[in-house]
Image: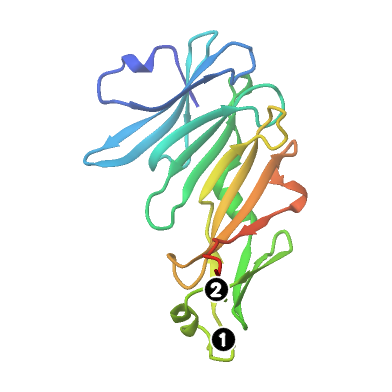
Amino acid sequence: MYTYPYNFRQQPAGTSNIFAFAQGDVNGDYIQDQVYLVGQKTSDSPYITDITLIIQDGRSNLFYNVPLKTNMGYQPRLFLGDFTGDGTDDILISMDSGGSGGFGYYYLYSFVNNQPMVLFDYETFDETYKYVVNYQDQYKVEVINQTLNLSFIIDLSNRDQEYLDGIYNQDGTLKAPLQGWVSGLNQLYPVDFDGDGVYDLYALQRIVGQYNADGLGLVQTPLSWDGQRFSSFFDNQYAAVLGTAADS
């Protein structure tokens, strides 16, 4: 982290661009601070590089530069809210990876006393939850979260016949063993589940079948701050599937 005693917006043109801005008390002194995401534009592309978190202390007007481990992507965004219950805003950073996988890059920072601390890191989340996705006989797919020891069953019987014929014999047995996968973190939302002014995180991951465009559903994980890390509510997790037209 670097401290700047001057206004970075007065630096020579072209050195940085502001892509997101928010105001809130992020250092805990009850004075509004200014929070920015700055970076470098890419010619002929919406892709942004060198994305950096900049915080201006509302009391001293000093600027703090917080480098990000993953610092490039699309549509960098900011959200300020209290995620730990200490009454001070934390800083949620979101970036899109682009591409067919639809991955997102997410960081949540505390900046109490002008000291940055990572509360959530998308890569740590991806490493924490391990999955196995197995196709089964009779048009079923089992999704197993090995970390939480949870199992979900997805019914494929309402998929189109051409899809099923490529996987199953006429008696509903598999033609060959087949596995899918659960993607890394795709989307992360701040949600105040209890309505108490303290935000939780709601994580979405795609359940994928034979290929990336073969979406089978979503794993939904609500996460709350336990004093040390964000963990799932009582080890709760959910799987959601897309609806299909009901028979008339």
**What mark, if any, has residue 174 been given in the picture?**
1
Label 2 crowding class (10 Å Cα cut-off): few <14, some 14-19, many 20+?
few
Does 136 sit above or below residue 82? below
Q: Position of residue 172 (x, y in %)?
A: 59, 87
Q: Splitting the image into 4 quarters, where does residue 144 fall?
A: bottom right
- Identify which residue, 148 or 205, lies in the foreground: 205
| Tag 2 residue | 158
Pick out the residue farthest to the right. 234
Instruction: Give neighbour class at mark 1: few <14, some 14-19, many 20+ (Cα, 10 Å).
Output: many
Residue at 55% across, 75% down: 179
What's under tag 1, amino acid-wise? Answer: Leu
Q: Quadrant of residue 38?
A: top left
Q: Is residue 128 above or below residue 119?
A: below
Q: Is residue 17 left or right of residue 159?
A: left
Relative placement, left or right, of 18 versus 244 is left
Q: Which mark is residue 41?
A: none
Is residue 229 visible to us here?
no
Q: What percent of the width, then of the height, locates residue 111?
A: 59, 25
Q: Which residue does the image show at 54% across and 91% down from the upper left?
A: 170
Indicate the quadrant where residue 76 lies.
Answer: top left
Q: Amino acid at mark 2?
A: Asn
Residue 53 percent across, percent down from the top left: 46, 29
Q: Which quarter of the figure is the C terminus placed in?
A: bottom right
Most extreme residue toward the left is 44
Residue 219: horizontal and vertical position, in percent? 60, 57
Q: Which badge, 2 or 1, comes first in the chain's sequence?
A: 2
216 with respect to 221 (left or right): left
Is residue 217 shown to the viewer in this render? Answer: yes
